Image: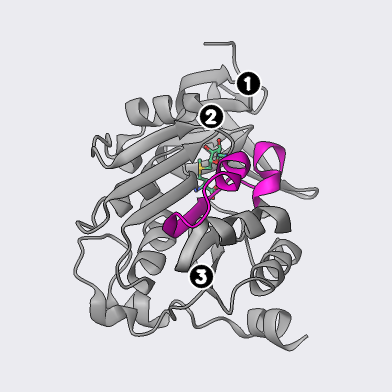
């Protein structure tokens, strides 16, 4: 455990995490205490107990997931692809160190194997211990934790997976390559002939160039490419995007297949999440 990380400031006896969103935009969270703070070989990893969001995972000063709203992102990045594939058996999660995505995938009894390739073992260790509202203290034997760089891992696993979920952090540092065309090409090869992938593709409000580039790259490889959204309070802009690339299966009538326990996803969300606001339609499909 190191001393107070530079993202935390004490102001009039109060602890504040300040996240730099953009040059002229900062977002601050008042914290009760720093539960754990440590530099790993890849990034600074912190679990912060915040007043409004409870225990929160912060990597290099950026909020990744919180006990209060982590379920929204984790349900959306998993259930949409898993319902789109008619019979997912082998699932790969790349990143996802908070274990929230893996936890959702375990809700599918027909899934036989869940490989989770996370570059940073420290993230998993701390989230299992301090962030059980998200990780659920995952102990399902189908989950195989592999501590490796996801970009290297996919190169060596051709024709292996039904569904690949890229649950990455922002496209800087170790996650930068997780947004590259070369990586998506390797993912395409790692999928079975009817496989599909999904990735988080950032904020449509603040990161439209990243979303557009991600959409174009995935569309250049997959015959079916769709974008969907959810609202995540702790991600910049609130509105968040996910891009799905599929070799064969279309995400149609997902609402008719819903039979799980969840806090965000329900039939209504499944029926409507591909409906995009007009500015996204214009940027992605009309320009
Ligand atoms: N839900 C969160 C969000 O969108 O902000 C992020 C989920 S998760 C915490 C992201 C994980 O990706 C981190 O734990 C990070 O260590 C991992 N990661 C980053 N680059 C990676 C890589 N090249 N290979 C595997 N995992 C990687």
Position of residue 188 measured from the top left corner of the image (x, y, whole percent): 58, 62
The picture quadrant where one finds residue 56 is top left
Instruction: Please tell me which of labels 2 and 3 falls first in the chain.
Output: 2
Instruction: Please tell me which of labels 1 and 2 falls first in the chain.
Output: 1
Q: Residues within 10 Å of mark 1 (few under 14, many from 20)?
A: few
Classify mark 2 as within 8 Å of ligand 1 or not, answering yes or no: yes
Badge 1 element = loop
Image quadrant in which the C terminus is located? bottom right
Q: Is residue 207 above or below residue 104?
A: below
Distance from disc 3 to disc 1, alpha carbons, whole Å, reads 33 Å
**Which residue is label 2 attached to?**
120
**Which residue is label 3 attached to?**
229
Q: Is residue 124 visible?
A: yes
Chain part drawn in magenta:
150-178
Q: Is residue 205 visible?
A: no
- Residue 41 circle label: 1
Give the residue at the far bottom of this rendering.
286
Q: Residue at x 62, y 44 (%)?
A: 151
Q: Is residue 237 magenta?
A: no
Position of residue 266 measured from the top left corner of the image (x, y, whole percent): 28, 72
Where on the image, by quarter, is ligand 1?
Answer: top right
Q: Residue at x 51, y 62 (%)?
A: 198
The picture quadrant where one finds residue 282 is bottom right
Position of residue 254 measured from the top left corner of the image (x, y, whole percent): 33, 78
Q: Residue at x 27, y 39 (%)?
A: 136
């Amino acid at each position: 455990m190191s001393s107070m990380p530079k993202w935390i400031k004490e102001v009039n006896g109060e602890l504040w995490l300040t996240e730099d969103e953009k040059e002229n935009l900062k977002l601050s969270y008042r914290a009760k205490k720093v539960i754990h703070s440590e530099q790993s070989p890849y990034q600074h990893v912190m679990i912060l107990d915040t007043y409004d969001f409870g225990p929160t995972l912060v990597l290099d000063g950026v909020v990744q997931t919180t006990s209060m709203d982590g379920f929204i992102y984790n349900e959306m990045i998993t259930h949409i692809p898993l319902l789109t594939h008619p019979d997912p058996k082998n699932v790969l999660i790349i990143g996802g160190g908070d274990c929230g995505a893996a936890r959702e995938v375990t809700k599918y009894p027909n899934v036989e194997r869940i490989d989770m390739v996370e570059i940073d073992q420290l993230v998993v260790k701390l989230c299992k211990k301090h962030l059980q509202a998200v990780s659920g203290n995952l102990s399902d034997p189908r989950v195989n934790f592999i501590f490796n760089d996801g970009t290297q891992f996919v190169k060596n696993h051709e024709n292996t997976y039904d569904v690949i979920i890229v649950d990455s952090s922002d496209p800087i540092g170790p996650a930068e390559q997780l947004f590259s065309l070369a990586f998506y090409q390797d993912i395409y090869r790692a999928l079975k002939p009817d496989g599909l992938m999904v990735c988080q593709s950032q904020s449509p409000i603040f990161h439209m160039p990243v979303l557009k580039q991600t959409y174009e790259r995935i569309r250049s490889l997959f015959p079916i490419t769709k974008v969907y959204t959810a609202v995540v309070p702790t991600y910049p802009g609130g509105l968040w995007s996910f891009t799905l690339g599929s070799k064969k299966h279309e995400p149609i009538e997902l609402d008719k297949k819903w039979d799980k326990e969840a806090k965000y996803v329900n039939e209504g969300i499944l029926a409507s999440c591909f409906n995009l606001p007009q500015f996204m339609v214009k940027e992605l499909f009309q320009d």
